[in-house]
Amino acid sequence: MLIKNLQHREKFLVFIILVFSLIINQYYANRGVFPIESFAHFDIAFRIINGDIPFQDYWLVSGLLIDYVQAFFFKVFGQNFQVYIFHASLINCLLTITTFYILKNFNLNIYQCGFYSFCFAILGYTTSGTLYVDHHSSLLCLLAVYCLIMALKTDKKKFLILLPIILGLAFLTKSAPSVYVFFSVSLI
């Protein structure tokens, strides 16, 4: 009975963290906009939907991944600012929940895991709120480091398989932090 009660508490806490990490990023993304950076991927994703091809029809300053994923979001959910920041909020949510489970794997109690995950949700993607290549690539690199930690801790091969995939996605977003993490991980 006690174990079942703890599992319900953990599921409820994970749900609260999930909702919090989505809402806090949505909130801060709507607080203000810096047009040069805040709408860069909005415009490119809109161009992709309208049939333009990167490097052929326009110059691209970052990797292709973030723009094509945003174009997919626009196709599925419609083209508006809330959908645009929802993409960043999902990344914030993914990393926050992953942080919770990484900490739980190190035998912290669920309330400590929850507290640190709430802190991560506040600091994760909320500093920019909208899509930003540096944040996106850095957070994907953090996810890759999480995979490395879990591979070393658990000896499960699935984490080693995920590691180059996530680093590849980070590289396709922006090369600078992902190459440094790749070389660091390769040394380990």
Image (cartoon, grey):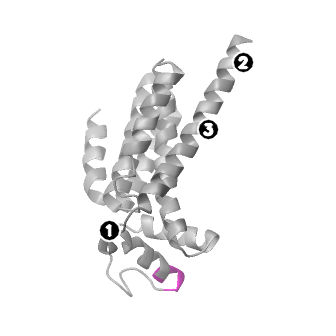
Residue denoted by label 3:
15
Q: Nearer the viewer, residue 163 or 40?
A: 40
Does residue 161 appear in this view?
no
Quadrant position of the N terminus in the picture: top right
Residue at point 40%, 49% (across, down)? 140
Q: Residue 4 has which mark?
A: 2
Where disc 3 sits, the SS reads: helix
Q: Nearer the viewer, mark 1 or mark 2?
A: 2
Task: Name the amino acid, label 1.
Answer: Ser
Image location (x, y in percent) of residue 71? 52, 72
Callout count: 3
Image location (x, y in percent) of residue 9? 64, 25
Extreme right residue here?
A: 1
Residue at point 40%, 34% (across, down)? 148
Dot 1 or dot 2: first in sequence order is 2
Dot 2 or dot 3: first in sequence order is 2
Most common SS among magenta residues: helix
Where disc 2 sits, the SS reads: helix
Q: Is residue 18 left or right of residue 176?
A: right
Task: Name the amino acid, label 2.
Answer: Lys
Q: Is residue 170 magenta?
A: no
Residue at point 41%, 71% (across, down)? 41
- The answer to whether marks 1 and 2 mark residues whose Cβ atoms lie closer than 8 Å is no
- The magenta stretch is 47-51
Quadrant position of the C terminus in the picture: top left
* Residue 19, quarter of the rendered image: top right
Extreme top residue here?
A: 2
Residue denoted by label 1:
62
Q: CA distance from mark 1 to mark 2?
A: 47 Å
Residue at point 36%, 73% (across, down)? 40
